Structure formats: structure tokens, C-alpha cells
Image (tube, helix red, strand yellow):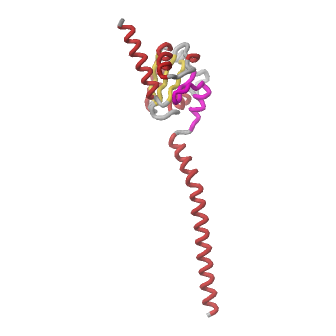
Amino acid sequence: MPIRSEKEMSVAQVREAIKNAKSVVLADNKGMTVAQVTRLRKELREVGVDLKVAKNTLIRIAARDLGIEGLDEYLHGTTNLAFSHADEASGAKKIRDFFAKDKDPKFVVKAGVLEGKVIDARGVNSLADLPSREVLLAQVLAGIQAPLAGVVGVLNGLLASFAYAVEARIKQVEAEA
């Protein structure tokens, strides 16, 4: 009986980790050395991502409990889960950057979970291509600021034209007097 309760606790831990994460990347780490995994874990932790290994059956049960459908086809072989807590794209970005220089990456992205929906490896790569939160905020602010700067420029031009017209009229009145 203790084995069953341990598995139930493991399922509960995986379920809570998936539920609390902003996104989850599922990957296979065929042939990675312990040193590589340790270095990857450390770099992921720096950006608010936890890397865990879980049995496919436990992941399947946790996903079913959370109402996540379509994950079964990706649950084969060893499965690593990268739980992003800081933002949705941080895990996918860091994993892509970590293996960008490898010609034969040992860490193959299988799928991901974003807002309770399953995305394939192509979707995870698209997520990694998104700019950071700070860049997105800067782009939004620039989009808001550009029209306002145009309005200010037009108003400034109108005021300058009015001031020139008043100055010209003053000179004209002085010249007549």
C-alpha cells in the first residue's frame, strides 16, 4: 500500500506544478550527460523555470485531472517537464538558447502546455520566438506614444503659425503707424 500513496503524492505534485506554471515544456533528453542536465537546470532556475523528470503515466493522470486533452501522443520515452513561473516564454527561450549551438541537440522538445491547452513542438518554438515581456511593453508604449507625439507636433505647428501671424500683424501695424 505505501507504493500507491507515493504515486498519488507524485501525481498531486505534478498536477500542482502544471496548474501553477504559466507554461510547461515537455522534452526528451536522450544522451545528455549529468553535467549538461545540471548546467541546464541551473540556467533555467535563473529565469524562473523548474526542470523535473516525471513518469509518463503520472503526467497523463495529472493532465487528465486538470482537463488537459491531447497530451497522450507526446508521452513516450523519457519526459522532462520545464515549468515556467516567471512568464510564458522563458522556459522555451532558455531551452532553445541553451541548445542553439548544438548541431545534434540532445534535448528534443516534444510539446508544451500553455493556458491549459496542448501545443506541439512548432508551437513551443513560436513561443520561444516571442520577444520578452519588457520588449512587448516597450512596443505597446511606443505604439501609444507615436500618435500622441504626432498630435503634439500638429498643435505645436498651429501655435507657431499663430505666433508668426500675430508677430507679422504687429509689425504691419507698427509700419502703418
* Residue at the extreme top: 1
Q: Residue at x 52, y 14 (%)?
A: 78
Q: Is residue 60 above or below residue 50?
A: above
- x and y percentages locating residue 115 in the rendered image: 52, 30
Q: Is residue 101 visible?
A: yes
Please identify the quadrant where the C terminus is shown.
bottom right
Q: Is residue 44 above or below residue 72?
A: below
Q: Is residue 145 above or below residue 56?
A: below
Magenta stretch contains residue 139: no
- x and y percentages locating residue 145 in the rendered image: 56, 54
Q: Residue at x 60, y 28 (%)?
A: 123
Q: Residue at x 60, y 75 (%)?
A: 162
Q: Residue at x 64, y 87 (%)?
A: 172
Please identify the quadrant where the N terminus is shown.
top left
- x and y percentages locating residue 54 in the rendered image: 46, 16
Count all numbered tags in the image, as a single digit.
0
- Quarter assignment of residue 151: bottom right
- Quarter assignment of residue 126: top right
Query: Relative to the observer, which residue lies in front, 156 or 40?
Result: 156
Query: Relative to the observer, which residue lies in front, 1 or 161?
Result: 1
- x and y percentages locating residue 92 in the rendered image: 54, 29
* Residue at the extreme bottom: 177
Which span is picked out in magenta? 109-130
Query: Relative to the observer, which residue lies in front, 42 or 170?
Result: 170
* Residue at the extreme left: 2
Q: Is residue 43 visible?
A: no
| Left or right relative to 129: residue 52 | left
Query: Relative to the observer, which residue lies in front, 103 or 134?
Result: 134
| Left or right relative to 74: residue 52 | left
